[in-house]
Every structure is written in structure tokens, then in C-alpha cells.
Amino acid sequence: MVDQAQTSSFQTVGIVGVGLIGGSIGIALKQQQLAQQVLGVGRSLTNLEIAKSNGLIDVITDLEQMAKVADLMIVCVPVAQTRTVLQGIFPHLKKDAIIIDVGSTKMDVIQVAKEVLGERIHQFIACHPIAGGARHGASAARIDLFHNKQVMMCPLFENLVSDVDRIEQLWKDLGARVYKMSALEHDHIFAAVSHLPHLLSYALMLQVANAPDADKKFVHAGAGFRDFTRIAASSPEMWTDISFANRDALLKELDGYLLIVEQMKKSIQNGDAELLQKMFQIASDSRKDWQG
Amino acid sequence: MVDQAQTSSFQTVGIVGVGLIGGSIGIALKQQQLAQQVLGVGRSLTNLEIAKSNGLIDVITDLEQMAKVADLMIVCVPVAQTRTVLQGIFPHLKKDAIIIDVGSTKMDVIQVAKEVLGERIHQFIACHPIAGGARHGASAARIDLFHNKQVMMCPLFENLVSDVDRIEQLWKDLGARVYKMSALEHDHIFAAVSHLPHLLSYALMLQVANAPDADKKFVHAGAGFRDFTRIAASSPEMWTDISFANRDALLKELDGYLLIVEQMKKSIQNGDAELLQKMFQIASDSRKDWQG
């Protein structure tokens, strides 16, 4: 008998949303024989057919058929669609099956999971792999997408320790480094280092694009502008989603940020070079010290 | 007789501030035989000795001795030091000599040049090469620093056309692409695409660094944060300088930016996903279309 806590392999795995993330999980599970069979569910049949022919999944099915047989289900959809997906799974969910997600926010996803799954919330384990890329869809999937990438896990006290261990091992088998934290902490951290920078980057790009002399500005914008605005090319739908899903933490970080910017603005208006340089110095030193 | 308008070569060139920019100009001039002799002036004798032994300059001298013999002087100091340098040059400035600068702001530099040089302002041509690097000082100089880089020139109506042509040809000989524009336009463009992003990047870095959970945030900050904050590692002294030198244009851009951020904030507070996504969409499309 195999000790289930020591292995991350599953009989049947269902992936809902076989895009870059879902598809990369699929192919890695299959290649490493961590799943006997991988089922794919999604909105676009064309995408699912690409996923199947590229070996990311074995079978194309729907939420109901998947839920009836899957031991592990991985929800890889925009966070705003989590409720609909869980509602489709819930009536058919097997007793010992595990559901995980890969969303960029965790408080809202867990809230939705509690509302839909009720007493069966112990079967849901919230995850957030920090991996992505400029390309999307099944055709962008890569077997090594999670190699040396961070995965956040936000276990609930309702989860079984053995289930949490299995999922942790699964991510490690895909090459990831796993960190566990509360959903509250997760959302505050990512509001500061990911969600806020996205909003700020979109805002600068919008400002320059809307300027009467936008063409000239774009001609002369250099490497600093390019780096600062790279994340402004991200999916508007996904980041609108995330902005609302993590609304409270994002607004809190934004208010803190605006205070700092106002202080810089006042120091320029007041001719206080000493204060401005001090603020720039702390920022510059921190950036140089950061090993990220 | 050589037609001076057709050649960018000079008998004696003086470089004030032989760092990354000044040193790279020096070695390129010497290697391409665009100057018979290159003089170096600066605050740090150690740096000047490195410059001389690395072949960036031929002779170490001071402002007075340089001004007495130089046909072209290139001021490569932080913009706030421009006045002092021009005051040192002015009493000894040869009748047909040309002075250029390389500062990141142009309105303030030209204002200072007019105050110091008076009727001899026609001898000053404002320039701004868009080139830099993480490393500083003479030891960071590179012969190809300006290859395929942009150089902004902001000629005054007082400048002789033949002088402007010579300087334009000089930058082209160093491999640069030259753009001419008014100082006002220059400062507005670079406030938007360079100075404001620097301030915003410093502000985010400062916010995360000052957070009680800064360590955790830095552990989980990813590629987007890294790109967004790369310019926050820039020199605090130089960017404090620039922020004050281009104060009016920077504050104007900052106010425009804050209006956009406030609009995004309100759309999140009001649950207006349509508006937020529309703003993100314009930004995202512009970023994808930009060939920078």
C-alpha cells in the first residue's frame, strides 16, 4: 500500500482552463507520470483540441463528467469565474477528491469556495503559482514552466494535513518552491509587489498614450520607460478581475503609495532637496540590496 | 582649406566630468581621430588618472587652462553644477569655441548658460544623449556607448547654423541618431517618459522597503516588480537634481498622472469594472503597439 502523504501522484486529474498554466501542469503531470489520466475542460473547443494534440491532456470533457471521476481538480480560470466552475463541480464532487486553484488572489477565492462547497470546503486548497509569460493559451504551455518558480499555498484549518502535504509535494515535483501563508497575508503581499505596480504601470501608459504628443513621446521613450511599462501589456480582463478580487488590500496599498508620492511632490514644490534625496536614497539602496 | 561645416573634427576638445558619458565621448573622439587632443577636467584626480591611463583623455588640466585652448568643451556634470562650470570657463572662453552639455534637462541649463555667458550664448549648444548604464566613472566608459542611441539637440536661434551642423555631425560620428527640438518640448517629453517614471519607481520601492513585512514582500516580488523598480536603483543625487531642474514639467505630468490613478481608484471603489477595464485596455494596446 502506498502512503498517500508521501506521493503526489493521482489516478485522474481534471484541469479546468487548459491555457498556459493549466496546460503546463497537464504536460508536466503526464510526462512525470504523476497522473494516470488528465482530463481537460474549457470554454474553447479549439483550444482543448490543441491541448490534446500537444499531449497536455488525454481527454476532453465537461465539468460534470470530470467531477464524477477526478481525484484532483485544478481550476485555472480567471478568478471571477471561480464560482461558476465550483458550482459545476460541487454536485458531482467525489468524497476524497481535492480541488485546487491557481488564482492571483486568495481571500476572495476562498470566500467563494466556502459559499459553494459549504461543509466540503476541506476539499479545497488555495494555491497561487508565480509563473506566467507573454503568450497565452494551450499552445504556450511548457513542461518546465514551474521550474524554480514560487508557489504560494494558503491552507485552511479545515484542510486535511495529508491533502496539503500531497499538493505541496505535487508542486515540488513540478520543480516549484512552495511557501505557505494565510490568504490575508498573501493578498497584502501581492497587492504591494504585483497588483499595485500593474495598476501604476497601466496608468503611466494611458497617460502617455492619451497625450497630444504621444507619437513623439513614444519615439524618445527609452529603456527605463520600457521596463516600467512592460507589465502594462498584461491582459486587461485578468487585471481588472484581480483589482476587484483584491480590492481592499489594493486600495490600502494605493493609499499608502499616494501618500509617498504626495510627499515627494511637496518636497519638489517646497524646494526641499534634502528630503527628496533622502527618500530616493532609501529607495535606491533597497533596490540595490534586493536580490530578486 | 577644410570646410568646417562638413567636418566634426576639432583641434582641442575639453571634457568636464570624465565619467561614463564624458569618458565614452573622449575615447571615441580619440579613436576616430575627431580630436587632435582631449583635455580632461574633474573633481576627482583619481578618476582623471584612470581616464588618462585608459586612453579616454590625453591631458589632465583645470577649467581655466582648458578654456584658454579648447575649441570644443563638453560639460558632463550633474545639471546643478552647470553654473559653476560655465562660470569657470567664461572668462577664458575663446572667441570661436563651442560649449555643449549632456544634461537630462534643457530649459534650466539654457537659462543658466544665458545668465553666465550673456551675449556669448551663441557659443553654447544644448545636447542630451540618451545613454547610460548601471556603472559610473571613467572605468565604465565605452567606445560604443552612443552607437544607435538617441541624442537630443535643442539649438537656440542665437547659435550659428554651421556650429549646430558640426555638433550634429559629431554625434552622428559617434554612432548616434540626432533629433532636434525646442528645450521646452524636450523637457515635457522627458518629464513624461523618464523623469516621472523614475519618481514613481522610487516611490514604490520606498513603500515596500518601509513596510513592516518588507522582508517577506521582497522574497515574493517577481519579474514585474523587478522591471518596474529597476530605475529605482539610479543615482539619488542625479535624480534629485533632475526633479528640481525640470520641476514645472515634472509636476504637470505628475498631476496628470495622479488624475488617472484617482480615476482608477474610484472605478474600483464604485465597482465600475467596465471603466477600469477600458482604461487598462487602452494602456495594454498602446504598450503592445509600441515598438520601443
Image: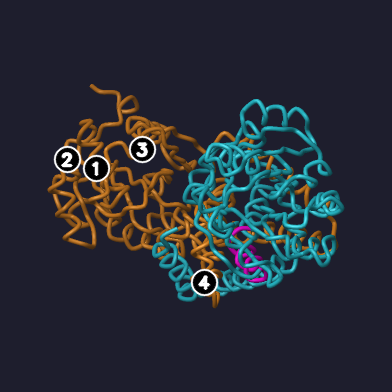
Chain colours: A orange, B cyan
**Span of residues in magenta:** B183-194
Residue B265 falls left or right of residue A63: right
- Point out residue B62 in the picture as x, y percentages from the top left corner: 81, 39
Query: In front of the other: label 3 or label 4?
Result: 4
- State which tag comes first along the sequence, 3 or 2: 2
Q: Quadrant of residue B132?
A: top right
Question: Crowdedness of circle 1 by 10 Å Cα count: few (<14), some, many (20+)?
Answer: many
The answer for which chain carries disc 2 is A
Residue at the far bottom: name it. Answer: A212
Question: What amino acid type should be assigned to the residue bearing mark 4?
Answer: Ala
Residue that label 2 marks:
A37
Classify mark 2: helix, strand or loop: strand
Residue A38 position, x and y percent, is 19, 43
Q: Position of residue A284 (x, y in %)?
A: 68, 43
The residue lying at 16 percent from left, 53 percent from top is A50
Label 3 vs label 2, nearer the camera = 3
Same chain assignment for discs 3 and 4: yes
Label 4 sits on a secondary structure element that is helix
